[in-house]
Image (spheres, grey):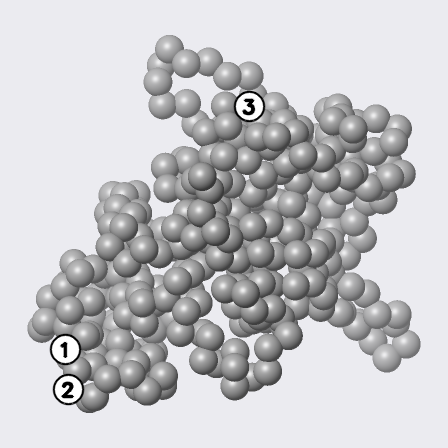
Amino acid sequence: MRPEPLLEVKHLKKYYELKKGWFSPKQQVKAVDDVSFTVYRGETYGLVGESGCGKSTTGRAILRLQEANAGEIWFAGENVARLPYERMRRLRRRMQMVFQDPYASLNPKKTILQILTEPLRVHGLYSPDERVKKASEILKIVGLSDYHLHSYPHEFSGGQRQRIGIAKAVILQPDLIVADEPVSALDVSIQSQVINLLLQLQREFHLTYIFISHDLGVVRHITDRVGVMYLGKLVEQAQTEKLFQEPKHPYTQALLSAVPITHPDDTRERIILSGDVPSPLDPPQGCTFHPRCPACMEVCRTEKPPVVDLGEHIVACHLYV
C-alpha cells in the first residue's frame, strides 16, 4: 500500500518577463509550464532533464524561494502557494533545501557553529546551550567532528562543505528536503559518500526527498520515482526501474540512450536527436519536443499532447492517445 501524499504540485507555472526596451513588447520565458506531480511520504522523487528544462526552478517554486505565477502546492494539507508570510515562515521548518554550490550557500563570515545554530535560533528552538549541543550532534552524524564548529566555510573541501549544507538542512528535522544537484559540483569519489549520507539520513530521520539532477546514474541509484522534464513541461513519470527499463516518451528514450554503458557485454542503440533545444522565449506550437522527435506526427505540430495514464507510466505524448 502506497503511503500518504506529503506534497502535491498541481498545474505549477513560473514565467519570467523580459523587456528589452521601452517600446519593445514584453516577452515571457516559460521556465515551468503546467507541471503536476505527487511526492509520497518517505520516498525520493527525482526530477531530471537537460540544463534549462526548469527542474531547479520547480524546486525553488515549491519552497517559495521564487514565487510561482499560477498553480497549487499542497504540503501537509496546506496550499503553500497561498499562505501568508508569517505562516509560510513557520512552515519552512518542515521544508528545507540543499543547494548545488556548497560554498555559495554558506555565509563565509560565520563559523560553522553560527551557521548550524542560526535556523534553530530563527525558529525559537531550544536554549543557547542546547543549540550548541544539537549542532555538535548533527555535525558528527554527517561525518565531521566537534573541532570543526569554530572553523569557517573556506577551511573545508567541497565535499565537507556539502556535508555542512546537508547538516544545516537536517538540523530542523524537516519532513521534505529539496536537493538541487547536491553532488554535481563534487569529485566522483566524493559523490558516492554524499549519496550514501543522504540515504542514511533518510532512514534515520524519515525524510522525503525531491532529488534534482542531470546525472541519470545517480538518479537511478537513489530515487524511487522519476519525473522527466523538457522545456518547462513534465513529459513522463514512472517508478525508477520501470522508467529506465521501458521508457515511453521519445525524449526519455533519447535521454536514457546517452547513459554510458558500464558492462562490456551490454549493447544499446544511441538515439541522436536532431537540432537544438528550442528557446523558452518562443517554444514550438503543439508538442514542444516535436522539432527534434524521431516519431513526430502531424498532430504533434499543432496540438499539445494530453497527459495519458498508462498504469505504470504517466506520459504526455500523442503516440499513446
* Residue 183: x %, y % from top left: 36, 51
Q: Is residue 288 left or right of residue 83?
A: right
**Residue 144 falls in image quadrant:** bottom left
Kind of residue at disc 1: Lys
Residue depicted at x 90% and y 76%: 23
Asked if the residue at tag 3 contacts the one at tag 1, i.e. Cβ–Cβ closer than 8 Å, the answer is no
* Residue to which mark 1 is pinned: 133
Label 3 residue SS: loop
Label 1 residue SS: helix
Which residue is at the front of the view, 25 or 239?
A: 239
Q: Earlier in the sequence, mark 1 or mark 3?
A: 1
Residue depicted at x 42% and y 36%: 220
Quadrant that contains the C terminus: top right
Q: Earlier in the sequence, mark 2 or mark 3?
A: 2
Residue neighbourhood size for the residue with mark 2, other residues' Cα within 10 Å, grouped as few (<14), some (14–19), many (≥20): few
* Residue 137: x %, y % from top left: 15, 69
Which residue is at the front of the view, 246 or 21?
A: 246
* Residue to which mark 2 is pinned: 129
* Residue 182: x %, y % from top left: 38, 55
* Residue to which mark 3 is pinned: 246
